[in-house]
């Protein structure tokens, strides 16, 4: 089954009506990402998570929390400042106080090297909400993801890929693995080179 971004929104709305809260969907999504990253990268000591302002970023923050609870040294790189969506903000507040939180514009050389060397780099900048072109800071994030020595995972979609058309913004992220939430979107087959291997994760929607 392939669903467009609008269809996915409708599926989530119906699931919420049926009693599965948006909060729970994000929790399930982030946990599924943490599970998947640990499965694919068994030597997972460090993880760099690039987080945008919306719900895709929220999924990344949940994944960061799970990974840290499991002993992985996960750092959050804020690409567009602090999260703006309600669910993402709630999950930002749930990070343990020792989580490194690094605004991308303020990264120091030692932090940049730490990010490049991380066992996994996770793209949680944009998902189905993305359209158009990447800003300079977002491109800084996708460039770092592309240059990472570790395995690169994209949550739902690589940032800079249009979910419905597969159209690529200049500098769109390239992932080794993309974790499609609930169902594949058209871009998973239209932009295969950027998505790498796509895996569909269950986020609790029946
Ligand atoms: N509650 C929900 O709706 C759920 C959403 N989920 C996640 O949420 C994602 C969708 O979240 P959002 O709709 O918040 O959107 P995204 O998190 O994909 O993007 C964030 C925001 O960026 C803005 N944007 C779009 N193009 C841009 C550009 N070129 N430059 C700068 N900003 C741009 C949009 O206004 C968008 O709202 C999914 O891909 C999935 O990862 C999952 O957590 C499951 C539950
Ligand atoms: K993403």
Image (tube, rainbow, N blue to C red):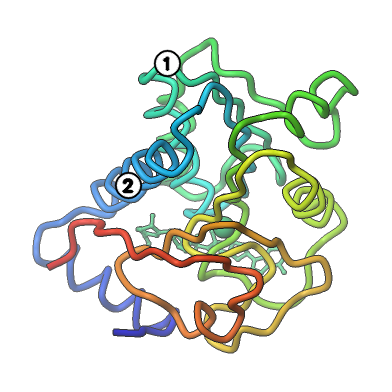
The circle on residue 17 is none
User: Is residue 22 or residue 179 the one in the foreground?
Assistant: 179
Which residue is at a point 33% across and 49% down the rendered structure image?
26
Q: Dividing the picture into quarters, in which one does residue 104 lie?
A: top right
For the C terminus, the quadrant is bottom left
Give the labeled residue for mark 2.
32
Q: Is residue 99 left or right of residue 19?
A: right
Q: Residue 41: x and y, percent?
A: 48, 38
Would you place residue 186 above or below residue 173 in this image?
Answer: below
Residue at 68%, 62% (x, y): give it: 174
Please name the residue that numbered disc 1 is placed on. Answer: 71
Instruction: For ligand 2, give the image quadrant.
Output: bottom right
Disc 2 to disc 1, C-alpha distance: 17 Å
Q: Residue at x 54, y 19 (%)?
A: 73
- Per the image, label 1 sits on a secondary structure element best described as loop
Residue 58 drawn at (x, y percent) = 47, 45
Q: Nearer the viewer, residue 187 or 36?
A: 36
Q: Is residue 4 above or below residue 160?
A: below
Query: Going 18% across and 57% down the picture, which residue do you hit?
Result: 204
Tell me: 35 left or right of 116.
Answer: left
């Amino acid at each position: 089954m392939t669903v467009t971004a609008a269809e996915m929104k409708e599926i989530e709305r119906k699931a919420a009506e049926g009693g599965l809260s948006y909060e729970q969907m994000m929790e399930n999504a982030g946990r599924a990402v943490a599970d998947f990253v640990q499965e694919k990268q068994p030597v997972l000591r460090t993880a760099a998570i690039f987080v945008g302002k919306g719900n895709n970023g929220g999924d990344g923050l949940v994944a960061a929390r799970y990974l840290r609870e499991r002993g992985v040294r996960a750092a959050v790189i804020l690409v567009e400042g602090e999260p703006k969506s309600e669910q993402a903000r709630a999950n930002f507040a749930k990070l343990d106080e020792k989580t490194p939180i690094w605004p991308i514009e303020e990264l120091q050389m030692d932090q940049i090297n730490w990010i490049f060397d991380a066992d996994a780099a996770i793209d949680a900048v944009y998902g189905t909400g993305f359209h158009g072109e990447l800003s300079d800071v977002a491109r800084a994030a996708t460039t770092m993801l592309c240059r990472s020595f570790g395995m690169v995972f994209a949550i739902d979609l690589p940032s800079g890929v249009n979910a419905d058309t597969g159209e690529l913004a200049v500098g769109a992220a390239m992932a080794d693995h993309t974790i499609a939430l609930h169902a594949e979107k058209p871009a998973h087959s239209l932009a295969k080179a950027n998505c790498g291997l796509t895996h569909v994760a269950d986020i609790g929607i029946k």
